[in-house]
Image (cartoon, grey):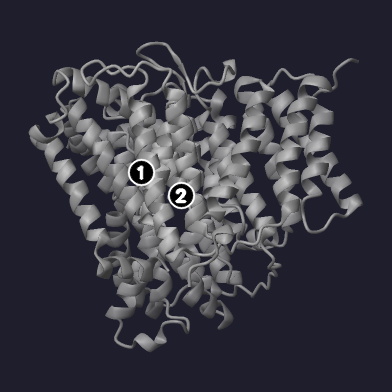
Amino acid sequence: MIPGLLRNKDFWAGMMLVGIGAAAMFIARDYRFGSALRMGPGFFPTILSGILIAFGVCIMAVGLRSGEKIKENLSIRPLVLLPLSLLLFGILMELAGFVPALVVLIFVSAASGKEFRFMEVLLLTVTLVVASVALFIWGLGLPYPLLRGF
Amino acid sequence: MELFNNLIFGFSVAFSLQNLLYCFIGVLVGTLIGVLPGIGPMATIAMLLPITYNIPPVAALIMLAGIYYGAQYGGSTTSILVNLPGETASVITCIDGYQMARQGRAGPALAIAAIGSFFAGTVCTMIIAMFGPPLAEMALKFGSPEYFSLMVMALVTAAVLAHGDMLKSLAMVVLGLLLGIVGSDVDSGIKRFCFNFFELTDGIGFVIIAIGVFAVGEIISNLSDPEERQVFTSKVGSLYPTLQDMKQSIAPIIRGTAIGAFFGTLPGTGPAISSFSSYMVEKKAARDPSRFGRGAIEGVAGPESANNAAAQCAFIPTLTLGIPGSGTMALMLGALMIHGITPGPMVMVQQPDLFWGLIASMWIGNLMLVVLNLPMVGVWVSVLKLPYRMLFPAIMVFSAIGIYSTNNVSFDVYLAAIFGVLGIAWRVLGCSPIPMLLGFVLGPIMEENLRRALQVSEGDPSVFLTRPISLAFIIATVLILVVMVMPAVRKRRDDIVG
């Protein structure tokens, strides 16, 4: 049975590829295409985008004829919290320094797990922060301030 | 005789104190990671790449290679002891290995796995030493058209033979090529697909994609897995296999090595397919196939030799031609590039210490695995008890610092977060990210070769069909595609890969 469009794996995979291909082709219009003899910066990307769109259309067609259903059950929690923890790490590295960035990174990413035991995470945080400072700052000599503004 | 001189030179490089140390660290970390279920070699190598920035390229490659085959080895320990494959290549070892463990014969199973792996490693070291130089010499004569066609062949083969939907894998290769050319164009200097971010001028960092898609993506999908893992460990018992065990294992080890060496060299097929094929072969060859699944030692000896052989022979195309056949090999090439070495046949001429040192170190590393790991089984078992909820924050810490330290800009960390989400989206949609990584590594080299090939031929695209070697690559590519589209072959492939 062909699954409904909303949960049709191949249809969406095709859509994504067509979407990326079309966007890339659109952006690559601004780059000189040149000729086969003198390939411009737009030559290779335009051709690749074209191929990508063609593949995307084929995969969409497969999806419409005999598509597979999306069955991965993703939990939203790690999907949101893990990228968020990286985002916060990046921001805090600029604003607050190495140690606070790590602490937040560990707490937020640990919160994305199924179980969150506060004391355990606290212990893990202390261990990982000490180990990272020892290895990266003192050992490898990375030039990051442990704490900014002090 | 040149072979021996080369090998002796290799050993003289590998036996330096520094290289021995990095080899040891690599093998140790690799085994540790291999033992832990839920952290694959891809994620580990990606995560540890930044640590190798400050050490010389030879040592870096030796360490990363050690992680790779160490992980292969560690995976088998977990399979045998707790019936959980540490990574895909050791899924098959679970079948008979775990049965042996339940019968109180975990020791012999582990020992045979180690002996088989060591034998495979030794043979493959010789194979690489013998076939590497002539292959590189041949490749040195290639012009741009040949190189371009070779890359097309490698990418198509890798996409088509690898596990997963063929069309999607091919599409992911193309997507990877597109991602690979982000940044300023070498020819015109125009910034392509940079969206005015100066951080993208040099292209998307290799480490960012590798960590984002493979490390972060893997954690997200592990955490979404509803199954709780439980670890039951069995007693290891005596380590020594009986004479009977040894006799039964000799032929499977030799066959497994041959199978692994073959599949390992081909792009797209690697340790996983090798160990599956070896198991099939052993089951067919056995006088009493019903023993399989109930603790037949051949079912451990063959696949374990095969996956180690494959892991090692995968270095042949990577080192001699500069063409990666698998995701891990793409990471190795990425590591070379980070160290400013252009992968390809010139590596062997310009940096013989890198090539021969790495090969010799692989043999030493395999020896270390046998000597060190068997007595350390107890340690690995206790490592297994570490819960995943303590592990993944540590992986995040390593990943984040690794990415940030590459260019010291937060932008890279944000980009990795985006790639983490993209990686998950691809997985959900059934698009394997590994072909994408292969395309990503080869993208700029491919464009450059296409440009030069067309310049030489004065804009005539038929140059790829009129030069004989290039034509041969194109014909091979078409043949592979035709064969794989045939329904019978396709079904068989799905059976093998499962």
Q: Residue at x 66, y 63 (%)?
A: B381
The chain containing the residue under callout 2 comes to A
**Badge 1: residue crowd in 10 Å (few <14, some 14–19, many ≥20):** some
At which x and y percent is residue B198? 58, 15
The residue that mark 1 highlights is A54
Judge by depth and name the residue closer to the eye, B51 or B192. B192
Q: Is residue B55 above or below residue B426?
A: above
**Residue under the point 59% across and 70% down:** B81
In this rendering, the answer to whether B224 lies above or below B245 is: above
Q: Give the residue at the far top of this rendering.
A: B189
Helix, strand or loop status at disc 1? helix
Q: Which one is nearer the viewer's eye here, B391 or B467?
A: B467
Name the amino acid, label 1: Ala
**In the rendered image, is residue B164 in sight?**
no
Q: Position of residue B349 (x, y in %)?
A: 26, 24
The quadrant of the rendering that contains the N terminus of chain B is top left
The chain letter for the residue carrying disc 1 is: A
Relative to residue B39, is residue B388 drawn left or right?
right
Is residue B238 visible in this depiction of the protein?
Answer: yes
Q: Is tag 2's residue or tag 1's residue first in the polypeptide sequence?
A: 2
